[in-house]
Image: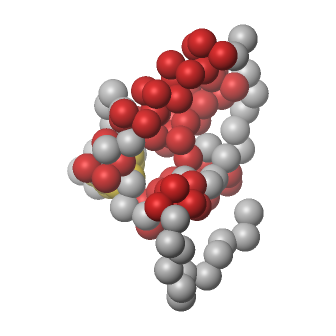
């Protein structure tokens, strides 16, 4: 999905929010990270289980990098473990999505099969 240039301000807050979370996996990644930090393969497995198909590592990497760039997710590297472990978790900005994600989940429970 092409990114809009950020050299002009988008006046609509809803549009800015949707643009920030426009990746196919963005909201689902945030949903999975609400409860606890996860490692890359744990996120990949959670998404694959949720959708019934495997998410490609490149797609997940792209989404995580975008969410990290937006300040929604942090990436923590623990070099003291063998092998090195990388954990992803929501920032305060990411945790602030909880109410919106919960509302979408309730809507899905009521209106989708």
In the drawing, does residue 108 fall left or right of residue 92?
Answer: right
Residue 1 versus residue 19: which sits nearer the camera? 19
Residue 11 versus residue 30: which sits nearer the camera? 11
Specify whether residue 67 is in view.
yes
Residue 113 versus residue 33: which sits nearer the camera? 113
Classify the position of the C terminus by image quarter.
top right
Residue 27 picture location, percent across and down: 53, 41
Classify the position of the N terminus by image quarter.
bottom right
Residue 111 picture location, percent across and down: 66, 16
Which quadrant of the figure has residue 39?
A: top left
Give the farthest residue toward the bottom: 7
In the drawing, does residue 5 fall left or right of residue 95?
Answer: right
Residue appearing at x 55%, y 36% in the figure: 28
Specify whether residue 20 is in view.
no
Residue appearing at x 38%, y 52% in the figure: 73
Residue 72 lies, with reference to residue 34, above or below; the image says: below
In the drawing, does residue 56 fall left or right of residue 17?
Answer: right
Residue appearing at x 38%, y 54% in the figure: 72
In the drawing, does residue 102 fall left or right of residue 89?
Answer: right
Residue 53 picture location, percent across and down: 75, 27
- The total of numbered circles placed on residues is 0
Residue 103 lies, with reference to residue 5, above or below; the image says: above
Residue 44 picture location, percent across and down: 58, 35
Residue appearing at x 52%, y 56% in the figure: 14
């Amino acid at each position: 999905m092409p990114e809009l240039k950020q050299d002009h301000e988008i006046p609509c807050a809803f549009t800015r929010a949707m643009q920030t979370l426009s990746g196919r996996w963005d909201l689902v990644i945030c949903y999975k990270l609400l409860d606890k930090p996860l490692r890359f393969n744990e996120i990949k497995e959670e998404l694959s289980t949720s959708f019934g198909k495997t998410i490609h590592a490149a797609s997940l990497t792209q989404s995580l990098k975008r969410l990290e760039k937006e300040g929604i997710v942090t990436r923590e590297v623990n070099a003291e473990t063998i092998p090195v472990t990388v954990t992803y978790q929501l920032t305060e900005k990411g945790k602030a999505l909880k109410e919106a994600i919960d509302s979408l989940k309730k809507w899905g429970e009521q209106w989708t099969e």
